[in-house]
Structures are given as structure tokens and as C-alpha cells.
Image: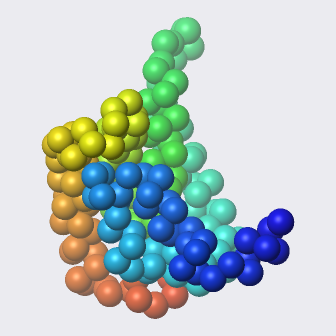
Amino acid sequence: MVEEIRALPIVTANPTVAHAHNLLGSYTKMNLILRSNLHFRMIQTKMTPMLGSLTGPMEEEVKYATENHFPRSGEWTTIKPYHTILDLVARTSARVFVGLPLCRTDKWLEISTQFTEQGRSGLEALFTVSLTVCSLCERLFYAVVSHMGASIACQAPAIDSERSWLHPASPEALGP
């Protein structure tokens, strides 16, 4: 079965088009993944070969997050597990995707987590209505689109100063 699917032409079985469709791309603005496959190419050609060298920085970020952002008390302390785990995952992912110091910037972490949260909740809302109503619901995604713009603005100085995203990232770019 898998070999049969692989043998299909890209115009028949295109995973990127399917992903954009599943994300209701024309309504959620996630059809931007159809404009370029740069994100896929970066993961396949730059990040996957570097997985072994990414483990250290990821471990360091988890340690940093637990030491600096988890409650420290000898007493029982109530936490919000969802938000605690979301913060931990966002910090660790940011360390890999944008590196130091941006990965520890509160503004960046807020943008990345809010983009995910608002995108998910908006998508859930769209799935509860018929597609004919979806076009009326596009306003739900104004916040998601604004987070995309804020994300670009946050990253622009690093991209402008180094332009290193076009070249293979070195483990040194991820910090000590």
C-alpha cells in the first residue's frame, strides 16, 4: 500500500497540499506553505543531519527552563500543567529553530505560543461550522496573521545581521 502511494504522481498525492487542506489553509492563511517548500527543505537538509548536535543545546534549554521558570519550593506548589509544558516545549523548540538569544526572549515565546494556541482554537471553531460559513469566520484568524507578522519582525534583526539561515547552521550558532 505504501509503495502504491509513493508511486502516485505529485499532482495526485501531494502531502503539502493535503496539509494545507487539513488546516483549512484558504481560511486560516496557512496556505502560505504552498508558496515555498523552504521550511521542508531546511528540516530535511539542515536540521535532520544535525540532530545529534542539537541534543546538547536542547538539554541545556530544558535545564535552563526548569531552573529559571519552574516554581522552587519545599512546599506543595500548584502549577498549570498545560501552560508549564507549553512553555517548556516552546523554549526548547525555539532554541533549535531561532537559537540564542532570541529563544529566551519573552516577546518571541509569547508570539510563538499565541500563534499556536490561536491557530488551534480558530481551526477548532471552523470545524464546527460548514465551509460556506468559514469565509465569514476568517476574522477569527486576524490574531494568527498578526502573530506571523510579529514573528517576522522579531527574527528580522538576526536574519539581517547574519543571513546564516541560507547556510548550514553550525552547532556554535545554537549557543554553548
Residue 145 place in picture, x, y as percent:
21, 54
Please report the residue visible at 42 percent of the width from the left and 52 percent of the height from the top: 23
Please report the residue visible at 49 percent of the width from the left and 12 percent of the height from the top: 78
Q: Which residue is situated farthest in the top direction here?
A: 76
Quarter of the view holding residue 163: bottom left
Quarter of the view holding residue 48: bottom right
Please report the residue visible at 55 percent of the width from the left and 9 percent of the height from the top: 76
Seen from the viewer's position, the closer of residues 129 and 167 is 129
Check the image and report above or below for 134 versus 112. Answer: above
Please report the residue visible at 21 percent of the width from the left and 46 percent of the height from the top: 135
Residue 115 place in picture, x, y as percent:
32, 47
Answer left or right for 139 relative to 134.
left
Answer left or right for 174 relative to 149.
right
Seen from the viewer's position, the closer of residues 2 and 150 is 2
Answer left or right for 121 relative to 52.
left
Residue 166 visible within the image: yes
**Count of picture labels:** 0
Check the image and report above or below for 62 versus 1. Answer: above
Check the image and report above or below for 152 versus 133. Answer: below
Residue 80 place in picture, x, y as percent:
46, 21
Q: Quadrant of the N terminus?
A: bottom right
Seen from the viewer's position, the closer of residues 100 and 51 is 51
Residue 61 place in picture, x, y as percent:
53, 52
